[in-house]
Image (spheres, grey):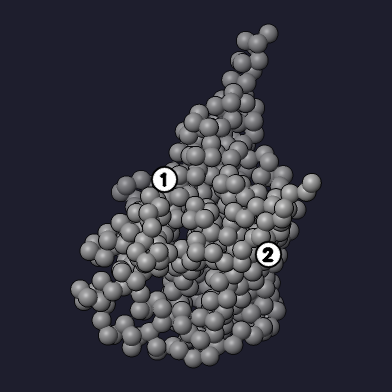
Amino acid sequence: MAAAITRYPWYKKEDTDAFFALFQNNIANFIVIAITMLGMGFPASIVYGQVLPGAAIAVMVGNFYYAWSAARLARKENRTDVTALSYGISTPVMFVFLFGVLLPAKQLTGDVELAWKVAVAACFISGAIEAAISVIGRWVQYHLPRAAMLGAVAGVALTFIAGEMLFKTLEVPVIGLLVLAIIIVGLVARVSMPFKLPTSLFAIVIGTAMAYLIGDAGSERFSDAFTHLGFYPLLPNLAWLEGLGLLFTGMLAVLTVVLPITLYNAIETMNNVEAMEAAGDKYDVRECQAVDGVGTMIGALFGGVFPTTVYIATVGAKWMGAGRGYSLLNGAVYAIATMTGLIAALAAIIPVSVVAPILVFVGMSMIATAFQANDTRYYPAVALAMLPYFANYIMTRFNRGAGEVVSDISSAIVVMGQGAMFMAILLGAMTVSVIDHQFRRAAAFAAIAAGFSFIGLMHAPKLAFNAAPEFVMGYLAMALLFIYFSFQEASHKR
């Protein structure tokens, strides 16, 4: 007798917590984009009328697709506890496009509209490249150790999410620590909140009320909130096509930034899909990379300039017990909020110190999963793979002045931060291989690291031949050492 088909719900209570976590992740990026682009001199008509609507379209398309994909997996495995993949703009990729594509394009053209069109074209090309990379996505996933991939993701979670958001949490200790306590009680200890409210919603209500009571937020927030209210239609345009002409006639240098960051984005998707498989939901990494690429291209057709990816917050949503409803709601709300200008309003009304603790939890869950999903003997590999992101975090936050700012600490910080994702995965993979006494495999990963360093994917500011010769020599020395131990072990077995 066939098993009864279980009903996979469209929405459940746990989706509310996950929605707020994902929404705040994405809205934080949208706010950074708006503030940074306005500061660069881009007009509000481009920022609010083109860039953010384009990003919202990409977010909506991806979230809706992954909600459908979750329902498909639920039917296939006859389960109701499937969690849809989160989808949004990758924070490291966002900063690279802001300062590595938009800003140079503006400086070279001297025209904000032309610079925006160049960035739209670069985003479109990035999406096309990631869609093409999806052909080999599963092969790469099979050959890269889980400890290496999850360790790299945990490094991002520790620095850009949990660490950064803990700083924001403590900027207003009275509010931040109270909200953090609510998150720990509700989401970590899983204790029910008063009136059975979702933990994230309860935390936001209490935290925002506290902010206004103690005077951390005042009436000026409301006046700022409604400055950019209006109607911004989500309409396609030909900026990407015009930008392609500009890109290939006089700004090919921008493509040297696009290629490595697209490879990073594809690997980030792969890592986060791997993390979800470890948490219990198995999705096809090739399909996800293709969807991310297509979603990025669709966003560019509507004026967006930032590639999208399966988001690191997915495991946090899984821990919260979410299904597909949070993904559906996130996509719909972003479309509405962007069209009406409500994103700026919400950002002004709700203090950062209120939402930051929710993102601390997301980072915590990713770090915990990196260890829980691996055997204890691989913990050193996970820990080592996390470390390059300390350098990447410092480098990103200081942007172009990082070399001078941190020179008294170490000259290696900047070069270690360049291509941190590749360095993290390859160091982690070498360590896993050595732990398993697979020295030839470790040598192969070291040789790949040398190759990446030679062409500038790691330890260099841009693609070039012989970009980081000292690192090439260092990784080749590692490879030779591993080969030596491979022969030594083989001789002992005879």
Q: Residue shown at 34%/50% (left/top)?
A: 407
Q: CA distance from mark 2 to mark 1?
A: 45 Å
Q: Which mark is residue 68?
A: 2
Pointer 1 residue: 412
Circle 2: element type: helix
Q: Secondary structure at mark 1?
A: helix
| Residue depth check, mark 2 versus mark 1: number of the one nearer the observer | 2
Q: Crowding near pointer 1: few (<14 within 10 Å), some, many (20+)?
A: few
Instruction: Kindly identify the amino acid type of the residue bearing the numbered disc 1.
Output: Ala
What residue is drawn where x is 69% and y is 52%? 78
Kindly tell me whether residue 390 is visible in this rendering. Answer: yes
Q: Amino acid at mark 2?
A: Trp
Measured from the top left, where is residue 100 in percent x and y? 52, 66
| On-image quarter of the C terminus | top right
Q: Is residue 455 visible?
A: no
Q: Residue at x 68, y 45 (%)?
A: 140
Residue at the extreme front of the image, as rendered: 1
Farthest residue to the top: give it: 494
- Where is 418 relative to 377, above or below? below
Where residue 477 appears, as percent x and y from the top left, is 55, 30
373 vs 61, left or right, is left
Total numbered circles: 2
Q: Position of residue 373 (x, y in %)?
A: 54, 40
Q: Residue furthest left?
A: 214
